[in-house]
Every structure is written in C-alpha cells, then in structure tokens.
Amino acid sequence: MRKIHLLFLPFTLLVGVIFSCSKATVPPDFKFNTGPGYTYTNATNNNTNITVGIIAAKGGTRLKSVDILYTDINGVSHTDTTITITDRSQQDKFTYDCIITPPTPYATGVATWTFIVTDQHGNNATRAITITYQ
C-alpha cells in the first residue's frame, strides 16, 4: 500500500505542474459600442467623420494591445494605430473611440477597418467594419 502512495505522489505533482503552466486560451471579449453617435455595422458615408467605439474585456488573461488596421479605397493595407495597454487598471476592461475620417482628397470607394484585441497570452478577437464612400 505504501508503494502505491509513493507512486501516486510524483504523478500528482506532474499533473499539477502541467496544468499550472498551461496558458489560458479564452480570447478577449470584444464588441463595438452601439450607443448614440457610434457606427458599429457596415456603413455608407458621405464625406463625414464617423466614430467606432471599442469595448474589450479580458477573457482568460489580461489585455495587452489593440491594433487598428485598414484597407483604403485603393485596396492598400495600412496599420493605423497600435495601442499597448500598460495601465493595469485598463487591462481587465478597455474602451477606446476611433474617429475615422474620409479619404483626402475625397473619393468614392470602399474601405475596411479591422480592430484586433490581443491578450497577454497572444489570444485575440477581431471585428471589422466596411465603409462605402459615395
């Protein structure tokens, strides 16, 4: 009986180490602000600024960054902004308003804005909005 206990102890320790070292795989919770004055779905725009509000909350671990990318009306991809979330008070819940201005000079076409929220383990959540300029 004593041998069984001695064999069980290392097994228990090994399982504990494996599970304590595994990283969380729950992605951040991310949505657009749907309040008045915010754009949160694909939209048609006639040469005016629009505001997209980001509301993100940690999933399995604290938030690390928000990347804002866009593909312009000519199909060229750009990194607009990268926000590193260093303030610990914002790593559980983060909000940000992105003001999108029309192309200069104004032209018609379609642009896509992609928002990527990443946590400290590299898990991410992505949302996109397509804007048609007329």
Image: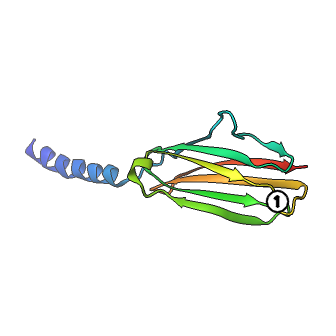
Image quadrant holding the N terminus, namely: top left
**Which of 131 and 58 lies nearest the eye of the viewer?**
131
**Which of 17 and 89 lies nearest the eye of the viewer?**
89
Q: Is residue 114 left or right of residue 74?
A: left
| Residue 17 percent location from the top left of the image | 28, 53
- Above or below, 102 relative to 1: below
- In the image, what residue occupies the spot 24% across and 50% down? 11
- Above or below, 36 relative to 131: above
Q: Quadrant of residue 37?
A: top right
- In the image, what residue occupies the spot 68% across and 33% down? 36
- In the image, what residue occupies the spot 77% across and 53% down? 112
- In the image, what residue occupies the spot 64% across and 52% down? 115
The answer to whether residue 61 of the structure is visible from this angle is no
Q: Is residue 107 left or right of residue 30?
A: right
Q: Is residue 36 left or right of residue 102?
A: left
| Residue 90 percent location from the top left of the image | 44, 48
- Tell me which amino acid carries mark 1: Pro
> Mark 1 packing: few (<14 Cα in 10 Å), some, or many (20+)?
some
Q: What residue is disc 1 on?
A: 103
- Above or below, 67 relative to 129: below
